[in-house]
Image: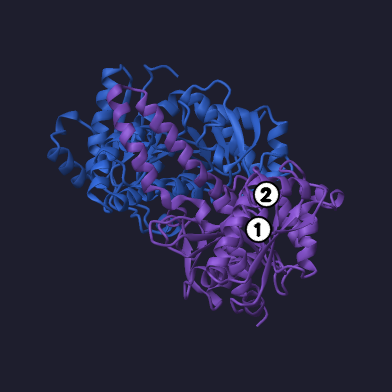
Chain colours: A purple, B blue
Amino acid sequence: MAQSQQVRIILDAMGGDFAPHNEVLGAADAVRHFQANGINAEVVFVGREPEIRAALTKHGLTGMNFSIIHADEVVTMEDEPAVAFRKKRNSSLYIGLQQHKERNAEAFVSAGNTGAVMSHSTLILGRIEGVSRPTIGTFLPTTESYPTLLVDAGANVDCKPKHLYEFAVMGSIYVKRILGVENPRVGLLNVGEEEIKGNEAALEAHGLLKASNLNFLGNIEGRDILMGAAHVVVCDGFVGNIVLKFAESMLTFLKAKFTAFADKSFGQKLMMGVAKPALKGALTGMNYEEYGGVPLLGVNGVSIIGHGKSSPLAIKNMILRADEVVRKEVNKSIETALNS
Amino acid sequence: MAQSQQVRIILDAMGGDFAPHNEVLGAADAVRHFQANGINAEVVFVGREPEIRAALTKHGLTGMNFSIIHADEVVTMEDEPAVAFRKKRNSSLYIGLQQHKERNAEAFVSAGNTGAVMSHSTLILGRIEGVSRPTIGTFLPTTESYPTLLVDAGANVDCKPKHLYEFAVMGSIYVKRILGVENPRVGLLNVGEEEIKGNEAALEAHGLLKASNLNFLGNIEGRDILMGAAHVVVCDGFVGNIVLKFAESMLTFLKAKFTAFADKSFGQKLMMGVAKPALKGALTGMNYEEYGGVPLLGVNGVSIIGHGKSSPLAIKNMILRADEVVRKEVNKSIETALNS
């Protein structure tokens, strides 16, 4: 799809923990980026119009002429996704996705309640033909120059071998199209490298992956993820969610250990004074904001999900990512791969 | 059981990557510890007698009068456990466990092939009444003053809810008896705190744990493990193995990131020169050697499993741990708990 073709992206202005402020700031930065790079893309807000207008005024952005689709209700972080779907039909989430489904826009972006964004997207947009279960992948940093995509990162807790195979196909296409990796290496997350290792689902998925035309490495272990052994790490969402949250807690753990160490003596405190910025410098590659949210792969549309704590930079990158996923026709590739 | 009662511990002298050297050095340190503390315990080697004698001579330990049970064969790290069990009946692993089964010794310790130590122990010693599946737990460090026991850490990849419940019971008893935690908090590793979250096995296990007389916290998430939310973290061995190996890879990952950071400029190199020892100092709590191996819980005997790379200190601590598990009658508590 050409840069000149218009892409409309609906942004859930009520989604994140700092909505609508980070949303309008991120949207403004995204629009500036589109203009500076000659990309024909537009951001449309969905949410409570008065609040959005107030935020635009506060941040001096009234001159940017954003369109706003008004939505009275907000799905909160505490809402049960299924209940919100039934009872909050005027939410920014519901109305925004409905607009996307009716093809008044090419993509939808939200930093709101992850479970609700996933289930609303699946229920409203439907699935791409050939996809049994939409999935959510997350990038983790590696010791190599590229991140690795952990898929499924929490959308599906009980998975059949066939689902794992589909995650591998969708993850490979995403990494190829978005990161430009020509022939992404796919690893099946397991308890040993040997083909005979694993639980029942992994054993059978191994066979499906081996017989596929993916660049399948075989099994990889927990210790291989951060070493960049694979571009795409396949697992069920139960394992994926636990690994992802464990990984996120490592920095908190290290900070606590550093603080305890510094508290022991004045010399150690001085040492840590130098070590902390060094640690921070060394770990910049772990900044999730750079990756710009994650798409819900397999839905019949483009739905990008961000962290509740998304900064303006993260929001901007989610919008840029949405534009990319539309232009690079990720969904068409998935449909072709799963129906041929 | 009184300190004065004799405990005989059989040490697989051929087990670890540095066998028999680290084994004889660790055994000597353990015996010195027993003597200095008035503990009536003895270490008996099992393995190739000439090699053991040569190592004792080399390290100046011939004066310590260790007993040696000769065993011609060695189960290597590459051996398939089931094949080794059938074909290497003269291995140090087989003969040592057989001696323990015949109650010529109260415990068995090995830093050899983990899978083989597990399966040989289960097949030769049998299970405690009421135990469906023996399990292996591993301590992970936390931001609190205590470690947390992750159980199952890789012995059982496909688990029924009942197995998870048994792991919780055995883990609790182990932590209570060995770490002295009066009423260990048990958490079920899951994808969300709510009772309705999780895969099928976790959902049902939640009910069993809730109905038990364990100190059950409910579900905990990946991010709670290192924060010390629970003393015992229950999961199946598929998840446990992946989390454990992922955790072990974090240090390698950080070192690589630090090195890359230091390579960028001379100033950053200097910064890292200070930061590295500080990092090491801050992370001493992550030294697995301190924990002294892990027992295979649920077998009808005491079998302590160590890392292949076990140092003399780790071997010493495994032997001390074996003595403790015998004296504190961990197995009797497990039998009582699962049959009442």
Find residue A38 and report its horizontal and vertical position in percent. 56, 72
Give the side of residue A86 with respect to residue B223, left or right. right
Task: Using the rendered view, name the quadrant where residue B220 is placed.
Answer: top right
Find residue B11 and report its horizontal and vertical position in percent. 32, 38
Find residue B36 and report its horizontal and vertical position in percent. 26, 18
* Numbered badge on residue A56: 2
A121 or B105: which is nearer to us?
Answer: A121
- Is residue B121 shown above or below A184? above
* Numbered badge on residue A64: 1
Chain bearing tag 1 is A
Q: Quadrant of the C terminus of chain B?
A: top right
Residue A137 can be seen, yes or no = no
Mark 2 in CB contact with mark 1 (< 8 angstroms): yes
A173 or A207: which is nearer to us?
Answer: A173
Give the side of residue B332 with respect to residue A267, left or right. right
B226 or B158: which is nearer to us?
Answer: B226
Amino acid type of the residue tagged 2 in the rendering? Leu
Give the side of residue A253 with respect to residue A71, left or right. left
For the point 36% across and 44% down, which residue is it? B307
* Label 2 packing within 10 angstroms: few (<14), some (14-19), many (20+): many
* Label 1 packing within 10 angstroms: few (<14), some (14-19), many (20+): few
* Numbered badge on residue B282: none
Chain bearing tag 2 is A
Amino acid type of the residue tagged 1 in the rendering? Met
For the point 86% across and 48% down, which residue is it? A87
